Amino acid sequence: MALWQYLLLFSTAIVGGGLALLGEERARKQLPTLLSFSGAYLLAIAALELLPEVFGAHELGSPGLFLLLGFFIQLLLEGLSQGVEHGHVHVHRQARYGYGIQVMIGLGLHALLEGLPLGAGGGAAGANHGDHLLFGIVLHKLPAAFALGLLLRRSGYSTLFVWGCLVVFGSLSPLGAALAEVASINPVWRTHILALVVGSFLHISTTILFEADGSHQHGISVRKFLVVLAGMGVAYLTAL
């Protein structure tokens, strides 16, 4: 990975969290729109590029098994992160530091895992898919960092603790990519890891898209429908 890619992964979390701390109310109104766009983009990139890459790798014995494993790993991590990955903000007033650390463990393990395929490479075609995976992660990390910053701030943690968590969160995906580069992960294991990440993306994106617009009714507003359509459209155009 190039230096700018590492910096982009890191700075996205800082920007997203910073918006929660500095411009909370105005930015919060735009969070559902950004979540819908990022969820649609993730789902479309997974369907158009990542899934064909995973299932097209003949060296991988059971791609579906690893994909399901990634889905259920994300299901377990969400129990720790409280759904921050898809914009949920479950505030615990005057929470102890254990709660913040718990959220960071769930969110951090996910961030570390999704960075691994980026550093593992994958040839010319893989590099192209890697760019789309990178942008998918960036679009996903921005609202996640905003939700993290908002959750920690409203739970009563100090500003120093919140910024520390954002720096750690921003560092973990680049760290995962760096570890994969240093370890020189072979193509078979890269595909295993990519299948895990795709499984987690499917969980996150479908959770975002299937949630109603702030109510318990099964419906979707025209605005959200158009945003989802735009997210999938952008993914399709970049995949051409």
Image: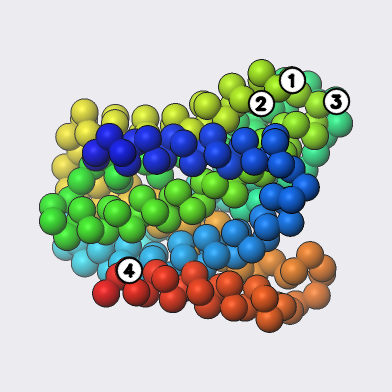
Q: In the picture shown, does residue 153 fall above or below 187?
A: above
Q: How many C-alpha atoms fall within 10 Å of the one at disc 4: few (<14), some, or many (≥20)?
A: few
Question: Secondary structure beneath disc 2?
Answer: helix
Q: Which mark is in front, 3 or 1?
A: 1
Question: Secondary structure beneath disc 4?
Answer: helix
CA distance separating discs 2 and 4: 35 Å
CA distance separating discs 3 and 1: 11 Å
Question: Secondary structure beneath disc 3?
Answer: loop
Q: How many C-alpha atoms fall within 10 Å of the one at disc 1: few (<14), some, or many (≥20)?
A: few
Badges 2 and 4: C-beta atoms under 8 Å apart?
no
Q: How many C-alpha atoms fall within 10 Å of the one at disc 2: few (<14), some, or many (≥20)?
A: many
Using the image as rendered, state which of residue 231 and residue 176 is in the foreground: 231
Find disc 2 in the rendering and name its residue: 162
Q: Earlier in the sequence, mark 3 or mark 1?
A: 3
Residue type for callout 3: Gln
CA distance separating discs 1 and 4: 41 Å
Q: Is residue 108 visible?
A: no
Residue type for callout 2: Val
Q: Earlier in the sequence, mark 3 or mark 2?
A: 3
Badges 1 and 4: C-beta atoms under 8 Å apart?
no
Badges 1 and 2: C-beta atoms under 8 Å apart?
yes
Find disc 1 in the rendering and name its residue: 158
Residue occupying the far right of the picture? 93
Residue type for callout 1: Ser
Q: Earlier in the sequence, mark 1 or mark 4?
A: 1
User: Residue 202's spot in the image, x, y percent?
Assistant: 49, 61
Find disc 4 in the rendering and name its residue: 238
Find disc 3 in the rendering and name its residue: 94
